[in-house]
Amino acid sequence: MAEICLALVMVGITAYAVLGGADFGGGFWDLTAGGAERGGRVRGMVQRSMSPVWEANHVWLIFVLVMVWTAFPVAFGSLFSTLAIPLFLAAIGIIFRGTAFALRGHAGTIREARLLGATFALSSVLVPFCFGATIGGIASGRVPVGNQAGDTVGSWLNPTGVLIGVLAVLTGAYLAAVFLAGDSVRAGLPDLARAFRARALGAGVLTGAVALGGLVVLRSDARALFDGLTSGGGLVAVLLSGLAGAVTLGLVATERYGPARWSAAAAVAAITVGWVLAQDPYVLPPRLTLDQAAASDATLTTLVISMAIGALLLVPSLWYLYRLVLQGRLDQDFEPLDQRFRPMSAGDEPEARP
Amino acid sequence: MADAALLTLAAERVTGVLGGAGGPDALVARRMQALSLAVHIPIVCFGIAFPAMILFVEGLYLRTGDVTYKALAKRWSKVALTLFAVGVVTGTILSFEFGLLWPDFMATFGEVFGVGFALEGVSFFIEAIFIAIYVYGWDRLSRRAHFLCGIPIVLTGFTGSFWVLGVNAWMNDPTGFGVVDGRVTDPKPWEALLAPNLGHELTHMYLAGYMVAGFVVAGVYATAWLRGRRDLHHRAGLVVALSFAAFAAGAQGLVGDWAGRRVSVSQPVKLAAFEGVQRTQAGAPFTIGGYYDAGRGEVRYGLPIPKMLSVLADHDPNGRVVGLDSVPPADRPPVNVVRISFQTMVAIGSALGLLALLFVVTVVFRRRLPRSPWFYRAVVAAGPLSLVALIAGWIATEVGRQPWIVYGVMRTSEAVTRSDSLEIGFAFLVVVYAGLTVAVAWLLRRLARRPPATELAEPAEAGG
């Protein structure tokens, strides 16, 4: 039962890293799109792609939280108290990101849009970094069992934490560029498709390079994690992840964005599995094992049954949403973000269109 | 009977699995949690009630074919989506805070109540999916499919609050686990989540959701009404919202009675704090106003109604009401905060009930809307007042639970994080929430100023 719950947590983390990560990556491209005019088209596309799905994507995070605190309560209490700083920052970042994004859709002037956009974009970088650093803290064995028993700063602000934080930001950016390139093709906007293709290739290569270089960091900073990732099942997962990443690059280079969505997701899933295998059998290395961390069987059974019933409702709903999205049925008109504010003749008609 | 129950609970004290020592800042942690809840709960009210109101108006459109209703439903759905986005982020903060502020509570009892949140997560997920489809699907799905996509939003508004209140009811009346040597054993998640307090808490909150959403929305249209905007759009907005609110306000009186009697059984000390009852006594009075003087152990300057509390709590003028002195001072909640909150809630709730009655009587017997501008001014005031009553009610029940995080089983001070720098986080959060409130108010004003006809002209625009 504990294994099933762990698997569900991994599904949640993977889904959040892929879907939520891509939404944060959208913020990254928004941030780096340049001035209001130059970046207007990129920002318009980010806005258009994210709007209908970001809330549902975000719920995967909630799913992970509730699964962990129900199935592995001791681990949850320990890691949230020791890693309170990055988690608090992530929570604040989530407020800023979600609110600013929702409000930007209603901005009346380019100045408002800029302010809200900057808030949205900066927090989109902060949040994945904090989550990555949190994972780094856990994986490098810096979270002891107890009520804030670990070092509240050193547990995440260390080479492994920073490395995984940076990787999380880059991975999100990579995923977002792949998805946005596909969306641009579907929207019939070849110039944007080219722009996102170039970003995807750049981010993909950079992510791969940092991941490879990062192994050196792990070797000196988190030897147990490094050993886990470079032997046995961990190694297989890492190689699979690298392979899926490379395949994605090839698919993007040849402009096959549909399959690239899936291979990019597979790369993230593989590295999530690799992480768990690398620290097996521990939930909080180097002491708390899966069996010790697991709640009692009655709870785990109830949880798994509840989730199975929930899945019966959830899976068709999600399928319906993504089908509508991928068919373009929920698409809004594409509008470069700076263009929206051009025809402002009268101040009382903020949403006037060209 | 009640004293015996307390004694039993005292024997079942649990020590936290992370040590149970707690930290220095329980009060700051409680304030942070309270602030976050105070921001989130009003949004929840809209999650509970607004979808039903929107769907009702869309139903009017489908029946009559009048696009005014469509414009109204569409306008409301955009507001609902914006509030949902705020609810998503503020709800996320809450779940983070459970771990950040109360690690030992989560570590010790996560296996008992956690499943409730897992189910709430499923419910919330479905809500997020269909609200996106609904709002972005205007004019893109068939009318029938669009309407049907609204139904899961209404249902999940109910199921979501069902599970969260299941957990809260459990914290107030914990069951579904055993205690051996201070350790939690043998968790029974279903028994815990379907705790006896759930029935009244859920109904009370569900109706409160309809009251808050109804009165706040009605207040917006009543303002317009007072300014002379009385076309079908504003009329429909006013009447629909006010009807939902009025129905809920009427039913709330009955639920309040039920809740009071439940609390007198499951948490007698809380009831004593609601009313500042010092000594256990038969035929206890209900005292209106005044304040509780802990030194004297009595309520001063209040207006007592003899035997009224016994009537309310027990439906018997000579019924016995447990007093604060049944437990040591360390086990009593801060009486004045709890009592003033409780009285505020009851007073506002009663006033809103009268307003609702006036509305219903006028509509039913005179077949028209009330004419006096004072009625509409009262409706404008009812929006913020209903929010005050909502928050006051939650303060009464949650502060009334103190000093326990799990009533009678674990103290709040034992559950709190060991962190000693919560003030920084608290200050930060105050600033963030103030900014959030301003930003949302700004956005809703902007939405409201757009002429309703733009909803029909711009099928593609759905905002954030």
Image (cartoon, grey):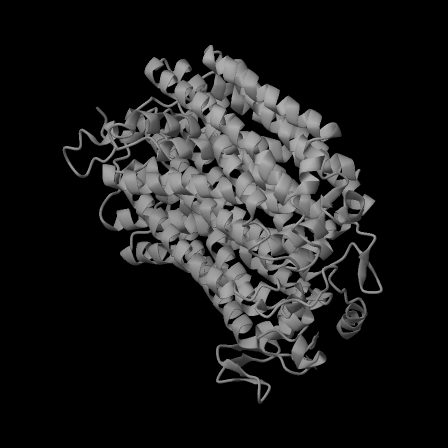
Vertical placement of B410 versus A247: above or below?
A: below
* Residue at screen point 36% across, 32% down: A30
The quadrant in which the C terminus of chain A is found is: top left
Residue A320 percent across, percent down from the top left: 55, 22
Q: Quadrant of residue B295?
A: bottom right
Residue B364 percent across, percent down from the top left: 42, 47
The quadrant in which the N terminus of chain A is found is: top right
Q: Nearer the viewer, residue B193 or A61?
A: A61
Extreme-bottom residue of the structure? B296
Residue B246 percent across, percent down from the top left: 46, 50
Tell me, yes or no, if residue B79 can be seen here. Answer: no
Along the horizontal axis of the image, is B340 left or right of A108? Answer: right
* Residue at screen point 51% across, 33% down: A21
Q: Nearer the viewer, residue B318 or A48?
A: A48
Q: Quadrant of residue B273?
A: bottom right
* Residue at screen point 41% across, 57% down: B355
